[in-house]
Image (cartoon, coloured by chain):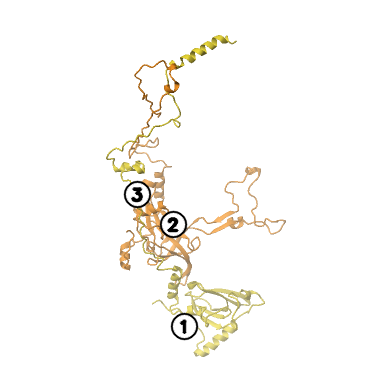
Chain colours: A yellow, B orange
């Protein structure tokens, strides 16, 4: 099987002896580990056209130099002139719908003569029948202010949310002030049978009669003219 | 490319056979110097494209060119840029003639300016980058400050881009967009982030019906029923199954809102109905996609308006 070990050993010996006479191949190492010399810098081609500059690294560009950051001044602010645009829109609408400011005064919470919760309010509309009821809540939202009125129609509890500044509302009058200041802002407890006042029609009818006497014979729509928003000027 | 190797040492005297020399002497010295060479590429390199190159061939359907053409053909890109605004709140507007009450949202434009452009050549589409408000430069990153510096615009609080159909829609950089950019009676689309609702169950998030109050149901009155079939459906829950999770806080577009009022001096735009998001959120307003493009007369130049008001401060310093 195997040749005699003495012959093999001789050949091995010769190869090692002649190894140095063989042609030397340049030693190769991987590109990463090869030791590199200093990088030779090439000069830029002279007079390189400007459109090629973008291809150069930033530090080699001929126009290189720190550009100063300029902080430009802001343009005049619109928000500074108008801090609350919602009330701005609202008040411009109110000026149009309620030029005398009577409706606004009526629902001003600082006004002691104004409408409070628990009062009985008589409202007439340009279209449709009048509606009166107890004021259950007042939502003050500028031009979008509304009151919730509760009454009984044919013995059925009826509520109506009335937009105070709506042009469809012709007049709003307090038929009866609440005897005592209510200790709630929203009188939702009036919906409970225990607290329900029932129909306010009698009170309103009496108020209208009294008013007609005072005003001299005219029964309906007298107070309306005072509060009616006048036509656009 | 492997580095070129050159024998630097030149031997004048005849050396003894190498096996007599020390190994260290024989070892090739590595005195290599790498030359760094940078090539200057052509500005207009020939593009190797295997597809559809040649006269009379239509562009590929899946290319950006074809996509842009499709958008132009469908007429779904506005002709002019939109504006950024802040939602200030809601109120109502009454019609004095008919008495109709219209709920409306009040939006305010403040220091809205064109910051930069996106062009077909560089970015693949046309868009106008619009900035809102003013931000202290100490709170702006240096990179953005450089951008504002070059564009000649003060640092902005919010920035968004509005796509436009073509080059004609690119409003000049530094130009102020005032409220009279929109016309009373025109229709707009508003985009804003709606209010975040947090982690919500399926009943609120997807309007599922929940389960019975009684009939043996316990602890699962508001939970979803089944998440899908068993063996017949692959015994798995399909991707996109509606389940409980984070709700709200994402971008929402509301289309076709009518512009009710416009006040350029105060920067107020009043639109019909509600706009998504809380008060104080940023709203993008742009001409409505699903209505004919409005024919708004070009608003007067900023310089003219400033002269009227007596202000001397312009957009550019």
Q: Which chain letter goes with mark 3? A: A
Examine the rendered structure and indicate whether residue A225 appears above or below residue B120. below
Give the SS element for disc 2.
helix
Give the SS element for disc 1.
helix
The residue that mark 3 highlights is A66
Are dots 2 and 1 on a single chain?
no
Image location of residue A11, percent across then percent down: 51, 11
Res. A202 image quadrant: bottom right
Q: Residues within 10 Å of mark 1 (few under 14, many from 20)?
A: some
The answer to whether the residues at label 3 and label 2 have Cβ atoms under 8 Å apart is no
Image location of residue B31, percent across then percent down: 38, 28
Image location of residue A122, percent across then percent down: 54, 80
Q: Nearer the viewer, residue B294 or A188?
A: A188
Are dots 3 and 1 on a single chain?
yes
Q: Quadrant of the N terminus of chain A?
A: top right
The residue that mark 2 highlights is B139
Q: Quadrant of the C terminus of chain A?
A: bottom left
**Left-right relation of A123 to B210:** left
The residue that mark 1 highlights is A226
**Left-right relation of B238 to A228:** right
Report the mark closest to the observer, 2 or 1. Answer: 2
Res. A230 image quadrant: bottom left
Let me know if residue B303 appears in the view.
Answer: yes
Q: Which chain letter goes with mark 1? A: A
Q: Residue at x 43, y 70 (%)?
A: A88
Image location of residue B5, percent across then percent down: 38, 26
Q: Determine the CA span between mark 3 and mark 2.
A: 22 Å
Q: Which chain letter goes with mark 2? A: B
Q: Determine the CA span between mark 3 and mark 1.
A: 74 Å
Q: Residues within 10 Å of mark 2 (few under 14, many from 20)?
A: few
């Amino acid at each position: 099987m195997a040749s005699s070990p003495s012959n093999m050993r001789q050949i091995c010996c010769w190869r090692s002896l002649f190894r140095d006479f063989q042609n030397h191949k340049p030693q190769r190492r991987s590109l990463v580990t090869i030791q590199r010399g200093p990088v030779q810098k090439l000069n830029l081609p002279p007079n390189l056209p400007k459109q090629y500059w973008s291809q150069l690294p930033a530090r080699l560009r001929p126009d290189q130099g720190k550009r100063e950051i300029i902080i430009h001044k802001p343009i005049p602010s619109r928000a500074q002139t108008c801090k609350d645009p919602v009330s701005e829109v609202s008040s411009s609408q109110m000026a149009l719908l309620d030029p005398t400011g009577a409706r606004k005064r009526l629902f001003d919470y600082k006004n002691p003569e104004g409408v409070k919760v628990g009062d009985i309010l008589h409202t007439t509309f340009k279209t449709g029948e009048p509606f009166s009821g107890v004021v259950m809540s007042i939502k003050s939202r500028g031009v979008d202010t509304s009151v919730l009125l509760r009454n009984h129609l044919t013995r059925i509890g009826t509520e109506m949310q009335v937009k105070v500044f709506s042009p469809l509302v012709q007049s709003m009058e307090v038929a009866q002030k609440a005897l005592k200041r209510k200790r709630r802002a929203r009188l939702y407890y009036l919906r409970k049978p225990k607290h329900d006042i029932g129909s306010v029609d009698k009170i309103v009818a009496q108020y209208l009669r009294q008013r007609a006497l005072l005003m001299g014979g005219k029964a309906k729509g007298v107070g309306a003219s005072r509060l009616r928003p006048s036509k656009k000027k | 490319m492997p580095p070129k190797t050159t024998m630097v040492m030149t031997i004048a005297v005849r050396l003894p056979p190498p096996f007599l020399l020390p190994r260290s002497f024989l070892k090739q010295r590595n005195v290599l110097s790498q030359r760094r060479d940078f090539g200057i590429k052509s500005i207009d390199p020939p593009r190797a494209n295997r597809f559809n190159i040649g006269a009379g061939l239509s562009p590929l359907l899946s290319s950006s060119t074809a996509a842009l053409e499709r958008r132009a053909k469908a007429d779904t890109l506005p002709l002019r840029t939109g504006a950024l605004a802040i939602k200030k709140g809601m109120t109502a507007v009454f019609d004095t003639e008919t008495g109709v009450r219209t709920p409306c949202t009040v939006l305010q434009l403040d220091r809205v300016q064109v910051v930069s452009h996106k062009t077909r050549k560089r970015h693949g589409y046309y868009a106008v980058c619009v900035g809102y408000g003013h931000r202290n430069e100490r709170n702006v990153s240096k990179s953005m400050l450089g951008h504002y510096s070059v564009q000649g615009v003060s640092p902005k609080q919010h920035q968004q881009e509005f796509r436009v159909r073509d080059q004609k829609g690119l409003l000049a950089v530094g130009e102020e967009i005032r409220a009279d950019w929109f016309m009373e009676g025109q229709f707009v689309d508003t985009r804003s982030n709606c209010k975040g609702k947090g982690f919500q169950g399926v009943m609120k998030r997807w309007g599922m019906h929940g389960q019975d109050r009684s009939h043996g149901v316990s602890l699962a009155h508001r939970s979803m029923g089944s998440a899908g079939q068993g063996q017949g459906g692959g015994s798995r829950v399909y991707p996109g199954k509606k389940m409980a999770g984070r709700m709200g806080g994402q971008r929402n577009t509301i289309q076709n809102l009518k512009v009710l009022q416009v006040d350029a001096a105060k920067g107020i735009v009043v639109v019909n109905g509600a706009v998504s998001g809380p008060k104080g959120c940023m709203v993008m307003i742009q001409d409505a996609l699903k209505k004919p493009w409005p024919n708004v007369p070009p608003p007067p130049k900023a310089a003219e308006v400033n002269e009227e008001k007596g202000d001397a401060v312009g957009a550019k310093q």
